[in-house]
Image: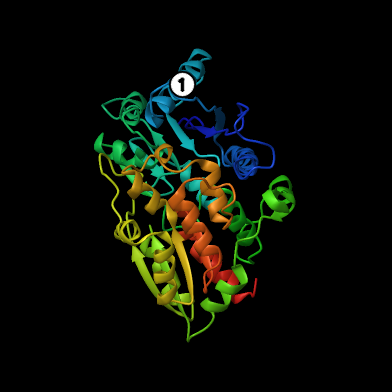
Amino acid sequence: MAERPAPLVLVVDPGTIPDPDLPFGSYAAVGMAGRRRLAIELSRRLISAGSGVAALHPAPPAKGEAFHWGRWYAAAARSMLARVRAEGRPLDAIGYAGAGALALADDGLIEGIVSAIPGEAVANNRYSTDAFLVAGQPSGRLTLEAALAALEECSTDNAAMHCLEDAGFAIRDLSSTSWARFDVDTPLDLALLRAGTRLPTTRRPDGVVAAFLEMAILPGGHSLEVPHLAEIGAVLRNRDSQLVVAGRVPSSSWAYLEMESACRVRCFIEERGMRSARDAVPHSLLADWMERRGPQELVKELATLGDAVILDTRVLMASRAGSSDAAAWPPTEERFASDFLDATPVATPWLKELTEAAAVSSVPFLLGGHALVSDGLRILVDAAWLGR
């Protein structure tokens, strides 16, 4: 039997085009620099797993148009497919990986991603996809061209498996694998990654990534440290304490908290899969409460419910904007600064008030996005028991 050709994965390179709106040393600039190093490391690991790799360059949307992931990805994938075939090389599987995807994944997970069989798509998470590979059949309707036609309709990468499943491809979901859900999108995610790489059970990054995590400096001269890490760890270890968690908490993360932390946990789960839900308007009860009473009062109320609070603020942003598109939320630099409880660069009134209130709250607050309330919770629990 002839050996199958190597698959090809397009890996996002977030730093290909210089962005004049990212001042040196800003939160967003640190985030981009970290994600670019992670993209390079991931590319090397995919090659070691037997895959070909090509850089997927950022393409800003046309003026007045929202970014559409599917049209961007499908155009790049078709271009690469045509180039490979023009060179006389066979190709029956093509994939995608975000720059910060699989940052804590072990070699087995990387190999699992690139192991799709004809007619199948393999993803790190079928409900919120950051990395996948789809393999076409040599004949019939489940060809690579059919896969790209389906993906072209996806407004975000998170919905890629929904589109491929609707087109008839079998889906293999690797989300139950350790660290499959951990995706670095923000500087806080980099801080969580730094904490995660110090755990005895996680993979160590390459020297370039490791050095960046240790040496990166945020505005104000701060290193990549998770805010209130020690205080939240003390809550997690204390049987008499209670932790409040709110946002897009996966069932696996909730279960891990229940089994591995000593404290009681009060959890408000809202808008799971909001980035992959098509034509759905995000809605949050916490955001509605905040709208009526104000951000400061929301912080005070959450503080009365526990000894520490972990809050997925992107659910609040999406609900207030009426959109899961981050372009409709407060600007990137403001979101990233808020995650570190730095209200200085935040101009959006409600987010500034929320950040200021969380920074001086009577209990420690940790604000962030999806990575924080998914595999980030596992990092916090494991670090707590190590006293880190």
Residue 201 shows up from this direction = yes
Q: Nearer the viewer, residue 106 or 88?
A: 106
Report the residue at 52% width, 69% height from top.
361
Above or below for 44 versus 282: above
Q: Residue at x 63, y 61 (%)?
A: 195
Quarter-wise, where is residue 231 in the image? bottom right
Q: Position of residue 336 (x, y in %)?
A: 55, 48
Query: Residue 141 versus residue 15: which sits nearer the camera?
Result: 15
Total numbered labels: 1
Quadrant (top left, top right, bottom left, bottom right) of the C terminus = bottom right
Quarter of image, res 248: bottom left
- The structure residue drawn at horizontal position 43% and vertical position 26%, both measured from the top left corner, is 72
Q: Position of residue 37 (x, y in %)?
A: 65, 41
In the displayed structure, 270 sits above or below 261; it is: above
Side (left or right) of 304 relative to 345: left
Circle 1 packing at 10 Å, graded few (<14), some (14-19), many (20+), is: many
Residue 180 visible within the image: no
Amino acid under label 1? Answer: Leu
* Element type where label 1 sits in the image: helix
Q: In the current view of this chain or complex, which residue is farthest to the bottom? A: 240
Picture layout, residue 174 above or below residue 244: above
Is 20 left or right of 350, judged from the image as shown? right
**Residue 252 spot, x, y in % from top left:** 40, 64
Q: How is the image coloured?
A: rainbow
Question: Which residue is painted at 38% across and 29% down in the image?
Answer: 68
Q: Position of residue 94 (x, y in %)?
A: 45, 31
Location of mark 1 (residue): 81
Q: Quadrant of residue 382?
A: bottom right
Considering depth in this image, is 241 or 59 the residue closer to the camera?
241
In the figure, 81 relative to 203: above or below? above
Question: Residue lying furthest top in this view?
Answer: 86
Q: Quadrant of the N terminus?
A: top left
